[in-house]
Image: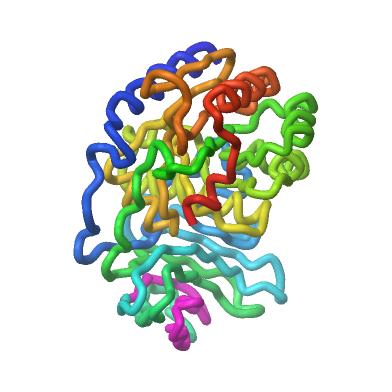
Amino acid sequence: MSRLLHRLAACATGAALALAGPFASGAHADAQAAANLATNPGFEIPALPLDDWGAIPGWQCTAGEAALGSAARSGGSALAVTPSGPDSTGRCEQVLGVRPGTTYTVSAWVRGAYVFLGAEGTGHDVAPAWTPDTRGEWRQLTTSFTTGTATTSVRLYLHGWYGQGAYAADDVRVDGPAPAPARALWNVPTTDPVVFITTDDGWQRTPEAAALIADRKVPVTAFPLPMPLGFDPDWFRSVTAVPGSSVQDHSVSHRDLTTLSAEEQQAEICGGRDAVLRRTGTAPKVFRPPYLAWNADTLQAAANCGIGTVMTATADFSRGASTVYHGGPLRPGDVVLLHFTDTLADDLARALAAADAAGLRPAGLADYLS
């Protein structure tokens, strides 16, 4: 744990020093003209540490029905789905960020009887591509869709059919223009006398912290990891009950994303998003990178997951600290970093005192970014 805390402090300080304003170096103005937007399209990414859902990063499948199979069309693994019974189609799906008013081509190689490939929520939904039987061979399914004028995300899906047995899929593609990269912020540009309280991870959940949040009516933006969020969803619901509070994305495994490929980053961010959506019913729109470390791939991966903002912080009051990265007292729009630890109640009280001394009040982060 001490090594983790040391690394967090070092990375947080380095990230803050690298940020000269609301946008960090490494951001680019627009996405490349075309890309494969699918998350984990070749099913090559193994199960992510700390994931509380399943073994297929980037994909949401019916529990107990999907696995990474070794009989792949290419690479080392493919999606292998065995429906649990005659009432299941063995559906697997993922949500992707897209551009409005844009045409995308979708394809996948499949094997099995009655396998379907399609997309929902496009604004102009079309019938899926399907095959009655591939006769034991790999066969490519292809379809396309054009997004509506207000469509910014779609749901890609694969499934079999009732009572038709197992199927496999590999080499999925969603080809078309990527959405513009997410914006990178370390504060919220505003002149309102507000500060934003954010809390990360979720491993230690104390009644003292929950009581202080409720008593002081503090709007809290929580960035929990999927595993602690899955362990105790009611506790996170209680500490984000104050109006203006929200639960946002903090990745699946809390790894330094700058050490990962663009594809792995997308699996981490989309997986965190899916965990929040499952537990709260609301898809997050803000991503807090672990260790406050990010690069240009992070911004594009976040956008591909439907995330509009990658948020670091301007101050750290975690574990007894009172560090304001820009120096001096807190300013309007500052984002305060805290963690769900056994010191959270004391840390939060200290952060609120610093905000009071600067004439600032806590406000809801998501409200100001919408």
User: Which one is nearer the viewer's eye here, 185 or 118?
Assistant: 185
- Residue shown at 38%/58% (left/top)? 304
- Residue shown at 63%/48% (left/top)? 244
Q: Where is residue 350 in the image (x, y as percent from the top left)?
A: 62, 19
User: Which one is nearer the viewer's eye here, 216 or 61?
Assistant: 216
Q: Where is residue 362 in the image (x, y as percent from the top left)?
A: 60, 37
**Which color mode does the image show?**
rainbow
Q: Position of residue 56 (x, y in %)?
A: 51, 52
> In the image, is residue 349 above or below residue 113?
above
Q: Give the number of marks.
A: 0
- Residue shown at 76%/42% (left/top)? 238
* Residue 369 seen by the camera: yes
In which image quadrant can residue 219 be found? top right
Image quadrant for the N terminus?
top right
Is 118 one of the magenta-colored residues? yes
Q: Which residue lies furthest to the left in this view?
A: 33
Q: Give the range drawn in magenta.
A: 105-130
Q: Which residue lies furthest to the front in this view?
A: 359
Is residue 294 found left or right of 188 in the rendered image? left
Q: Position of residue 368 (x, y in %)?
A: 50, 50
User: Which one is nearer the viewer's eye here, 250 or 161?
Assistant: 250
> In the image, is residue 335 above or below residue 6?
below
Is residue 34 found left or right of 165 in the rendered image? left
In which image quadrant can residue 339 be found? top right
Majority secondary structure in the magenta region: strand
User: Which one is nearer the viewer's eye here, 30 or 191?
Assistant: 191
In which image quadrant can residue 146 be found? bottom left
Is residue 353 found left or right of 217 in the rendered image? left
* Residue 68 seen by the camera: no
Is 174 one of the magenta-colored residues? no
- Residue shown at 55%/52% (left/top)? 367
